[in-house]
Amino acid sequence: MDMTVLNRRGRKALYTGIACMLFPLIIGFSLGLSLKRSWLTKEEARILPFLTVFHSLTPFPVVVYLLENLKILNTELGQFGLSAAFVSDAIGLILLLLAKWSRDAMENGNFHVIFVGASSIIYLLIHVFVFRPAMVWIVKQTPKGRPVKTVYIHMIMLLMLVCGLLTYSVNFTFVTGPFILGLAVPDGPPLGSAIVNKFNCFTEHVLLPLFVTICAMKADLGLISLSSDLLATYIILLIATFAAKMVACLISLLYSKMPINDALALALILSFKGEVQLSIYSYYGDDQVQVILDKVLSLTIVAILINATIAPILVKYLYDPSRKYAGYKERDIMHNRRNAELRILVCIHKPDNIPTVIKLLEASGPTRQTPLTVYVLHLIKLIGRASPVFISHQMQKKTLAKTSYSENVITAFNRFKQDNLDGISLLHVFTAISPPKYMREDVCTLALDKLASLIVLPFHRKWSLDGFVESEDCAIRTLNCGVLELAPCSVGILVDRGRSTIPVDSSYSVAMIFLGGRDDQEALTLAKRMANDMMNIKLTVVHFVASGSEEIRDLGDLLDHEVLKDVKLNNVSGGYVTYIEEMVEDGPQTALIINSMIDEYELIIVGRRQNVVSAQTSGLAEWIEFPELGIIGDLLASSDSNTRTSVLVLQQQQQQQ
């Protein structure tokens, strides 16, 4: 758990968390007092406070899992929900602790409560002043980039069991000890991630389903008709606490000027029920009110099932995180003024991505007349944390208190800025630590906030120096496809074949393959910006024309003609451009020409041209391996092509229909 999650959302999340916990409690207790006098026996009335607290809780783990399943963990709504759930869960734990001590005082006397309270305080102090420093020491003893020693992991697991026994011996739940110990473990790598990697699969996919199944097997639907007054009271209490929680959340969120749909979605998220509620029932298994609990357990499981089924559906209907990326405004290179500042967001996964990206930025012509604003986003897989983290390295005191992320990325791009002071008007580095399947939200949100015209993503495949495929990362490919679908601006996928790491002696040769269409127009606009004699960047535009289609037939052909006009006349400001026109009959002829010219250049730029049918590529679509690169991009990045030439595939901003 990231204990600083509350600071990132401020008072709004604090007030929402308090309201969604306390308001249902007040309504539930008030309703329980009025109902138990007329409907319930004395023994049955004893369970009402427990049921009220039970339905008022907002367990943090349940909210995390819901947000993960809905794939909105990284959204603004998801982050707000995490903070509010954290506050509500903390209040719930405190109230449960006080209720436990109060019941112990009535049953065992005040001396026992004093003993338990003193033991609890000592236990917490041991975690703060012994276990936490020990965990930090383990992190410091682990070399950077190396795994934590297995013996440390085993010691922590043994300590977890001992902590569970200690808390159970003083009449707390067994899980209280491990939970507090978990707060002492530093979040993220190397220790938190090592524990998650070693045990999460078994606990989440084996133990948790078994636990839920056992709880469900305890339910007996035949008991529902045995106590109509109790069950009627229970249903009224369930509806009242749920409604109170929804109303409390809505009032707080609407007061904060949140849109009504988002407020309803967040209220449903904070009212979600799951495994934690079942575990609370399990804890009371040996309690003297178990006979009564059995009568409502079946109804409780049905209520949890209904809640867990309907809530996600309603949240999906009410909240669509992708709608904020809708392209109502043109944010691309083509509609950027020729000498205006170009804003580029580049993404980095591994250190291997850095040289290629920097070489592309250098080739993009950063000069005083054509400046660049560069935003660098270092994407790190979230392991060993409960919540994602987004770091701006321009606010280091606030965000980098203990851990220095992205040092190599910051150093490399600061050096790039120093080498191009005239052409780089602004350079900011960010780090996003989140699950791979949700990283697209970080990328698209940052691009939207910074008004970027282009997002550059590294390709998921890495080649060795001898031209063979060295590694692939399917998570990166999923991210690239997701960004192509959602991006609020143009997107480029950069395929590094190794040439960018080799120093260029005299010039940097760039080719642009033009077939026609919006994506090719975008790619050609970027290529023309690169043409610069002062920086020894030579541009060659290869225009593939289908036989018999030389005349202008529609608006698309007219736009193609306009964007090619200055290239044909060699009138591109800043540099000399070579224009080559190739007449082709079909796709195989196009592929043959491209394969013959590919090794003549350091970088080839192409448009993605998704779902564009043309004679120049006929017969090639059936062999495509990576649709995110388009037909020509896939041909250039094919494992069958033993080349060292890098490829940039561009997709122009997708306009909202």
Image (cartoon, grey):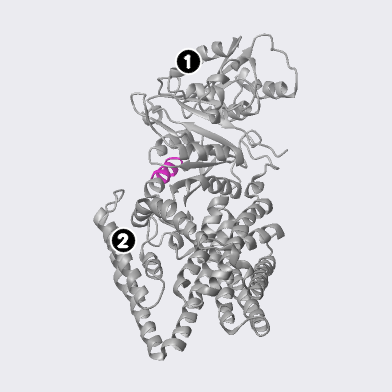
Looking at the image, residue 458 lies above or below residue 93: above
Mark 2 or 1, which is nearer the eye? 2
- Determine crowd level at label 1: few under 14, some 14-19, many 20+ residues with C-alpha closer than 10 A: some
Residue type, label 1: Asn
At 31% from the left edge and 74% from the top edge, which residue is drawn? 126
Q: Which residue is mark 1?
A: 595
- Image quadrant containing the N terminus: bottom left
Q: Which residue is mark 2?
A: 157
Q: Secondary structure at mark 2?
A: helix
User: Residue 414's x, y, as percent?
Assistant: 42, 46
Q: Secondary structure at mark 1?
A: helix
Q: Which of the 4 image quarters holds residue 182?
A: bottom left
What's drawn in magenta, residue-wise?
Answer: 412-420
Q: Is residue 569 visible?
A: no
Q: Which mark is residue 263?
A: none
At 68% from the left edge and 9% from the top edge, which residue is drawn? 548
